[in-house]
Image (cartoon, rainbow, N blue to C red):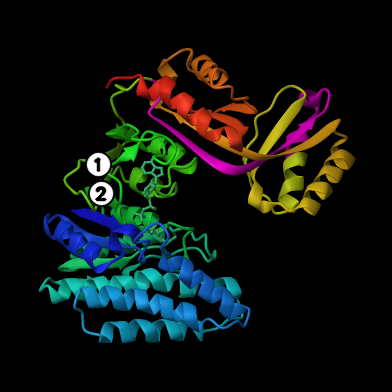
Amino acid sequence: MKVVKFGGSSLASGNQIEKVFQIVMSDPARKVVVVSAPGKRFAEDQKVTDLLIECAERCLSNLDSQEIVAAVIKRYATIAEELQLPSEIVSEIQADLEARLNGDRCKPERFIDSVKASGEDNHAKLVAAYFQEQGVEATYVNPGEGGLLVSAEPGNAQVLPESYERLYSLRDRSGLLIFPGFFGYSKEGEVFTFSRSGSDITGSILANGLKADLYENFTDVDAVYSVNPYIVKRPKEIKELTYREMRELSYAGFTVLHDEALVPAFRAGIPVQIKNTNNPLAPGTRIVNERDNTNGPVIGIASDQGFCSIYVSKYLMNREIGFGRKLLSILEEFGLSYEHTPSGIDDISIILRENQFEAELEEEITKRIIAELHADEVKFEHSLALIMVVGEGMRHNVGTMAKASKALAGASVNIEMINQGSSEVSMMFGVKEVDEKRAVQALYDEFIASVTV
Ligand SMILES: Nc1ncnc2c1ncn2[C@@H]1O[C@H](COP(=O)(O)OP(=O)(O)O)[C@@H](O)[C@H]1O
Ligand SMILES: N[C@@H](CC(=O)OP(=O)(O)O)C(=O)O
């Protein structure tokens, strides 16, 4: 039995949904279909989820949202028309969205989640209606009724462990099950969404809960490429990679799969297959527990922008008990989360996402670190990109770091920081954002383009 998830791009139009129908029907093992909200049909298009967020935020600010509501409804109406579905389905979607927009606004973040979740919820109903029109037994499943319980964290929900057992009973239902991605219900019965792109997480949870043989994730590319195709033209496709490799890569910028979408499948030992809705015969990429190391030390190179570092130095920092804890607790008090902490004898850098900062906060943090930790120097550095070089083979190869540094030097890229992950499957380089593309290309040429598999 297979759980199959289709992303927003795969469900963006009537024509795309027809392809989805053909794919699902071509394999009787495909039992559960997880759907996203309609995504972009072309580069400048807007995702329905983005429209819904804008709509909810306008409502909260008491601004007129009629135009955006109309744009959302138009997306569904166009799809329904293309699929020749009766117009009642669109009226139901409109009534549902209006009810949500007229709902309780006392807790703004929960209000936003309820509106946001309507994108997948209503699309699952529409997709189920289309399958039924084709004479197929297909039922929409509400995540609350189906057993997907999540923590009450708006926009960042986590699955509750008891969900898995509850979801198992979905196996007994007959026909296809059309399940909306991206959200679940708290124990109190309220809607909470995962973080953005979280329909991938729903698919993985369902694969685990239903003990599926395979979790297929259909998107708009033939495979996971060894590097972001927007940075390097026609990069090599990855045939197979491990959960650990993919988790590191998706965390570091391979947006093709949400970085939290691997753990549920991994825990149940279920392979994940990335496939293309627009080219379903392409084999895609398989994510498994172990693979043969046939590709050299590096399998993929991911990068992401928008980081900053706080560099703190103090002579004899290494001998001061509790220095790191005190430093991190200052950040905790400001509600900041950090990504990495490379350190030396007398210094430490803390890498954070830049979007958490405003200029005044920077000043306050600097003052507190100097006053409370008596640091010799505190320095903020902005506009950094992190590049993650990933591969299980790195554990068995000497000299990977030296080769990477040489490649970066050859491209005149200055390395701002280096961090070798304890897992030994990744190596991270911090560079200036302006150098990101050049650095990725140089590393790709060194480790991937030159290797023949
Ligand atoms: N290394 C990579 N391999 C493949 N796709 C990548 C990679 N890095 C980033 N992407 C992007 O991920 C996109 C697919 O993810 P996403 O847009 O979330 O699709 P969906 O709508 O199916 O959820 C691709 O179109 C591509 O632009
Ligand atoms: N629609 C949600 C959830 C999701 O997973 O979407 P997509 O499959 O289009 O990445 C979002 O945009 O965040």
307 in magenta: yes
**Which residue occupies 67% across, 41% down?**
308
Classify 250 as above or below 390.
below
324 inside magenta stretch: yes
In the drawing, does residue 403 fall left or right of residue 4? Answer: right
- Above or below, 78 against 155 in this view is below
In percent of width and height, residue 123 lies at 32, 71
Q: Which kind of residue does numbered mark 2 sit on?
A: Asn
Mark 1 to mark 2: distance in Å? 7 Å
Residue 79 - label = none
Q: Is mark 1 within 8 Å of ligand 1?
A: no
Region in magenta = 297-325
Q: Is residue 147 left or right of residue 170?
A: right
Q: Type of residue at label 1?
A: Gly
Find residue 284 and name its label. Answer: 1
To which quarter of the image does residue 134 belong? bottom left
Contact between marks 1 and 2 (CB within 8 A): the answer is: yes
Find numbered disc 1 in the image and state the secondary structure of the residue it sits on: loop
Can the viewer see residue 190? Answer: no
In this image, 233 relative to 345: left or right? left
Q: Secondary structure at mark 2?
A: strand
Query: How far across and how far down the image is residue 130, in percent?
Result: 20, 73
**Among numbered discs 1 and 2, the one appearing first in the sequence:** 2
Q: Which residue is mark 2?
A: 276
Along the line of sight, the residue nearer the viewer: 216 or 223: 223
Which one is nearer the viewer's eye here, 418 or 345? 418
Asked whether residue 250 appears in the rendered view, the answer is yes
Total labels: the figure holds 2
In the foreground, 240 or 83: 83
